[in-house]
Image (cartoon, rainbow, N blue to C red):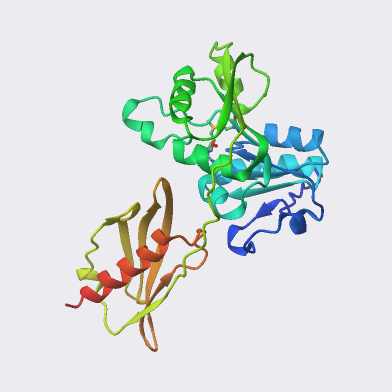
Amino acid sequence: MKSPFYVSLKPFLHHGTLSRPVKWNAIFANDFPLEVEIGFGNGEYLERISRDNPRVNFIGFEQYCERIQRTLRKLSRTGFDNVRVLRLDARAGFERYFPPWTITRVHCLYPPPWPKKSDAKHRLFTTDFLKLVNSRLVDGGVLKIVTDHRPYIDWVLENIQDAGFTVEFNNIQANYGTKFEKKWVEGGQSEFYELLLTKHGHIPIGLKEDSALQSYIIDNFDPDNFSFKDYSHEGVAVSFKEILYDAKKHIALVHVIACDGPVAQNIRIVVALSPKGWRVNLAEGTMLMPTMAVSQALECVYQAAKMSVG
Ligand SMILES: C[S@@+](CC[C@H](N)C(=O)[O-])C[C@H]1O[C@@H](n2cnc3c(N)ncnc32)[C@H](O)[C@@H]1O
């Protein structure tokens, strides 16, 4: 019989449990330099660079659970203790987890290129994000972006002015062996593109703080009359997806999308009957970053639930 393979969860950090500011030297129990990989996918590159550089600490951001799972399997095999991964939009991570001048190198291999013009708004390396990365890098620190999509490079170069970087551009061969790179190679692509952006001037952007999340109590609630008005103001937006109601348990689950600028979070808010009235709060287990938009989402659901009984 095949013996079971246990995956260590030690490298996985739940952002809800991280102290602020994050004490990376306490997490890694040393003060080695920090490097970050954005969108590590199945973790081939993260596993390799962490194995090759045991005196560097690596933090990876990825959005998809299955890819994080595959990466944790790889990291379990390697057994090194110099990697931590988070399921989080890297933009929120850079804003909140790294004070200025703390990262020596940022790697991003094959960010989604969003090739259609109408989708370009979803691309990662906007001027704002480039400035944020700059502020978190040490002087002389490097942001490496690799892509299969040449127009993506031109778009980043358009955004780079005033972001405090000097630019090196290289045509390169496939040499990272990641899932997406292999896919392009199998599709016949042999030339890829690399940007090395070196910090030469500092852009001051302070750490962003979490927002306080409130729960609310209302006297009455009518799920059949629940009408949610989407909210949008100064970069914070909340849009309604659906409401599910369990009439036996007197619990409604409201699914909304909370956006702080480009960072979107799917969250669930519960409206449940309690001895004190109908309680409105975040659903247990909702993985979220407590941002202005999440706080606003709670307020919107509270208002809509209150209005449901006129
Ligand atoms: C095209 S895949 C490339 C994955 C991997 N680097 C590779 O080469 O196989 C892009 C990855 O970036 C992740 N990603 C995109 N935007 C992100 C963001 N803002 N924060 C964290 N991960 C992100 C996606 O979830 C996806 O897994």
- Please state the horizontal and vertical placement of residue 20, each as a whole percent of the image: 62, 63
- Displayed-image quarter of ligand 1: top right
Q: As drawn, which residue projects farthest toward the bottom?
A: 275
- Please state the horizontal and vertical placement of residue 239, each as a whole percent of the image: 31, 55
Q: Residue at x 38, y 52 (%)?
A: 259
Q: Is residue 275 above or below residue 264?
A: below
Q: Is residue 97 visible?
A: yes
- Please state the horizontal and vertical placement of residue 223, each as a whole percent of the image: 26, 71
User: How many labels were placed on the picture?
Assistant: 0
Looking at the figure, which quarter contains the C terminus? bottom left
Q: Residue at x 42, y 59 (%)?
A: 267
- The foreground one among 236 and 149 is 236
Query: Going by the image, does 166 lie left or right of 211?
Result: right
Q: Residue at x 27, y 71 (%)?
A: 303
Q: Is residue 42 above or below residue 304?
A: above
- The foreground one among 16 and 276 is 16
Looking at the figure, which quarter contains the N terminus? top right
- Please state the horizontal and vertical placement of residue 55, each as a whole percent of the image: 83, 41
- The foreground one among 103 and 294 is 103
Q: Residue at x 48, y 24 (%)?
A: 157
Q: Quadrant of residue 13?
A: bottom right
Query: Going by the image, does 146 lie left or right of 283?
Result: right
Q: As drawn, which residue projects farthest toward the left?
A: 310
Q: Is residue 1 visible?
A: no
Query: Going by the image, does 6 lie left or right of 185?
Result: right
